Amino acid sequence: MKRPMFLTIWLVLMTLSAVWSIYSYTLGSENITKMLPNLPSWALIVFVLLGVVNLFAVIMLWMWKKMGFYISIGSAIIVSSLSGMILGGLGIAASIMAILGVVTLYFAMKPVWQNFK
């Protein structure tokens, strides 16, 4: 099965994004708590877990599994909800980015949807 170039590029970007997210919320958590002192401590743990879930979803997409797409949708909904509740105005921007990411993934997958199992 040949993967379209745009889908490949998007999956690479999603992989890098998930790894960066995990790194930022673990090793870079001190900077985050300095910038957002009112951020609840549990939020960092949840965002790390969501980063791991996103990485798992991307791995599934690389392996042509539709479930990776559905996991990405669920993760984007959770990220959007949490970001809006915790971060207020900043969270709205994060929510929009999460939704746009899934929409872009959908359009990247659409031409080869039948290849996903």
Image (cartoon, grey):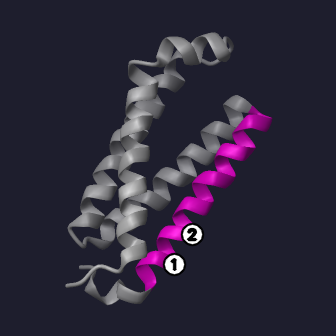
The residue shown at (68%, 30%) is: 86
Q: What amino acid type is highlighted by mark number 2?
A: Val
Dot 2 corresponds to which residue? 103
Taking the image as drawn, is residue 26 in sight?
Answer: yes
Residue 88, percent from left and from top: 77, 34
The residue shown at (40%, 65%) is: 9
- Asked if residue 11 lies left or right of residue 95, the reply is left
Q: Magenta segment: does it hold 103?
A: yes
Residue 115, percent from left and from top: 26, 85
- Asked if residue 101 lies left or right of residue 13, the reply is right
Q: Is residue 110 above or below residue 52?
A: below
Q: Main secondary structure of the magenta part?
A: helix
Tell me whether circle 2 and circle 1 mark residues in contact (CB < 8 Å): yes
Taking the image as drawn, is residue 70 in sight?
Answer: no
Badge number at residue 23: none
Question: Could you classify mark 2 by the number of other residues whose Cα lies within 10 Å: few (under 14), some (14-19), or many (20 or more)?
Answer: few
Stretch of the chain drawn in magenta: 88-110
The quadrant the C terminus occupies is bottom left
